[in-house]
Image (tube, rainbow, N blue to C red):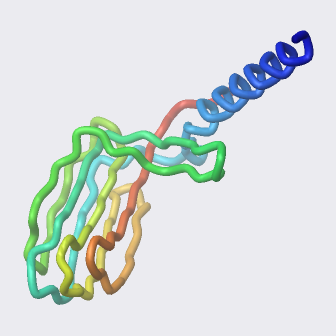
Amino acid sequence: MRKGRGSLAAARACAVGLLVLAVVSACSLTTEGEERATSARVRVEGTSPHQLTLITTKELYEQYNPLTGEVNPVPVDADTALITLPFDRTLDIASTGSVYVELRNYQVATASVRLRVELDNGQGDDRTATLSDNAALVYYYLFSDYSYR
């Protein structure tokens, strides 16, 4: 019995350690001197026989999976729109400095697309892909002025 309780205590301690690791690892820190973005220009070009789904938000956080070591974005209060190509819109992200953009194809027919996201602080991404059924391109930028000092 005592040996079993020791194993349970060790398992609990391990679980608490993993939880602390997950909370600490969930922070995405900025580089010193990095400025908060106030706008994000989202452009989608290419060809698609149908509308594509664009999901955007300026509210998100990162979630750490201790089993795989992956850190994944979790959007909060996202806006979803069906878009026709070409698409060009500037999003106001001044309140958070962060942005999440997901371009998804829910149709069987493929779409050849280019997704460009340009933040006014110099960050961004430019990708091309052929999206088939339920495939997506995701870009996110998580600003944090939190420091461990």
At 28% from the left edge and 41% from the top edge, which residue is drawn?
94
62 horizontally vs 17: left or right: left
Residue 42 place in picture, x, y as percent: 24, 66
Q: Residue 18, image x and y in percent?
A: 69, 32
Residue in front for this viewpoint, 49 or 5: 5
Occupied quadrant, residue 89:
bottom left
Q: Quadrant of the N terminus?
A: top right
Q: Is residue 35 left or right of residue 104?
A: right
From this viewpoint, which residue is outermost toward the top? 2
Residue at the far right in the pictured view: 3
Residue shown at 33% from the left, 38% from the top: 96
Q: Please give the name of the residue rendered at 15% of the width and 70% of the height, measured from the top-left corner.
A: 88
Query: Does residue 68 appear left or right of residue 129 in this picture?
Result: right
Residue 23 higher or lower than 47, as above or below: above
Q: Residue at x 36, y 41 (%)?
A: 60
Q: In the visual, does 87 lie left or right of 33? A: left
Q: Locate residue 114, reporting x and y percent.
A: 29, 81
Residue 134 occupies which quadrant of the picture? bottom left
Q: Is residue 92 above or below residue 138?
A: above
- Asked which quadrant contains residue 123, the reply is bottom left
138 or 18, nearer to the observer = 18
For residue 19, above or below residue 98: above
Between 67 and 113, the one nearer to me in the picture: 67
The number of callouts visible is 0
Quarter of the picture containing the C terminus is top right
Task: Point out the residue furthest to the front here.
Answer: 1
In percent of width and height, residue 90 lies at 18, 59
